[in-house]
Image (cartoon, grey):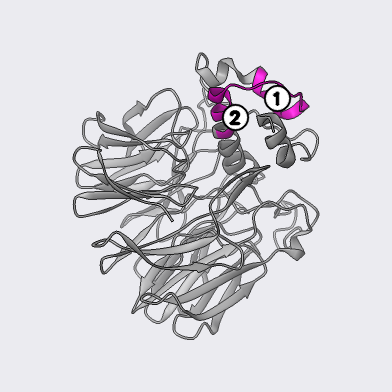
Amino acid sequence: MSCPEQMLNTIGSLPTGLQFWKAGLPNGSQASQNRPYIRNCVQRGVSYNCSIKMKKEIIKISIVLVLTEILTFPFLLNAQDQTNAVDTTFKLLSMSNIATAPHIENGIIYYGSWRTTFGNYEQGDGHIYAVDLSTKKELWRYKCLYEVGSTPVTSEGMIYFGNGELVSYRDIRERKGCFYALDCKTGKEKWSVNTGGGINCKPSILGDMVYFGCHDGYIYALNKKTGKEIWKFQTYGPVVSSPVIYENTIYIGTKDTWLYAIDPLSGEMIWKSRIELDKHSTLMTPAVSDKRIFVARHAGRMYALDRMTGDHLWTYPSDSATNLPDDGFIHSPPSYFHNKVFVASHDFFFYVLEEEGDLRWKKMLDERGTQNSIPYIVDSSVYLVNLDGYDLYSIDINRGETNWKFESTGSIFSTPIANENLIFINSLNGNLFVINKQTGKLEWEFSP
């Protein structure tokens, strides 16, 4: 089967007029030069003979498009009446575009293999894996009811994560998801809770409670030992932001473009702040400092708010900026480290801002931009993945210079993590890459 036929099984039936070709490819790049050819292959379904190189281009671009443009959610807030319930009309639906990450606890690394399908081209298997770091061998695997969609967390011998269905054309009321608690040592299920939507945000734990957001528009608080619901808070859009807990307050954004501050014990709202009225675009996971909250609107800008009141402090780029790329500015959740904000962008640059909103430095990786993984910072380096999902970079946070680049053999749409002198990152096909933090060389690799 030719590569256009492989892609058309999935892409050919999408709604007419859906804009596939807003990937923001830089002029002059190989993918940009071949864009008309790729468009003809995929959109028209003409059976051209693609070269191996072109097949790789189509696969990479299609993954980017599905993870960025297609992976949106149908909840819309009625700007005329903010008290209306979520819109459950027929829309294109899927898990959203949050890159997951591995999690390490007591010498064991846990990660999910998020299944992605493009016609006959499939990656991932819907399992979550536990791998012993000393033996480099699999301890257990757990087959989820749906596709793994969240970064796992651990607490007191249990591992917690959520999942849900991927692309579908069914009504939102038919969506399903599940939140799991497993035994860390054995992988046996302790309890699970079904939800009315997919879950792909990293959960947070405080005391005996575990918190997570869901595509059904609710923020959940469960007893982490039993799974009993303590409270749930209704928003007016899907929740794909992870709950960030700081000084006994939950900060979380949703696709209704509100940022919420919630009491973690009672579930009562402390305040909410609207980001960009009438622009329905997902708010990414916020980063928090003592005085400020930094939040990005997907395909939008970076915002700083007062942490105590939710009042708007600054926007980057400023509201008067006119040189934004056509498909927006921010492409990933921000990170906060040593009074600086780190964020990737659709204009192919990686930005470092001062806490007051001034630009410290920016860097283009390789004319392919950066993708939607959260910039991971440890010591004096930041680690991030480029837009095509094949290269991991280490960049000096003070000088903005590249320390090294790791070229993977699989699509690493994931956020890296560090443990001692190693960097860990997993690919869409379920492989785990373990990289030397100093040199960028591959130390070992685990394949399920």
- Location of residue 299 in the rendering, given as x and y in whole percent from the top left corner: 56, 38
Q: Which mark is residue 41?
A: 1
Residue at coordinates 39% horizontally, 24% vertically from top-left? 366
Residue at coordinates 53% horizontally, 52% vertically from top-left? 124
Instruction: Assess whether mark 2 and mark 1 are in contact (beta carbons under 8 angstroms).
Output: yes
Quadrant of residue 17 in the image? top right
Q: Which mark is residue 100?
A: none
Which range is magenta? 37-59
Labels in figure, total: 2
Q: Quadrant of the N terminus?
A: top right
User: Does 44 lie within the magenta span?
Assistant: yes
Helix, strand or loop at label 2? It is helix
Quadrant of residue 63 in the image? top right
Mark 1, Cα crowd under 10 Å, few <14 / some 14-19 / many 20+, is many
Q: Which mark is residue 58?
A: 2
Q: Amino acid at mark 1?
A: Cys
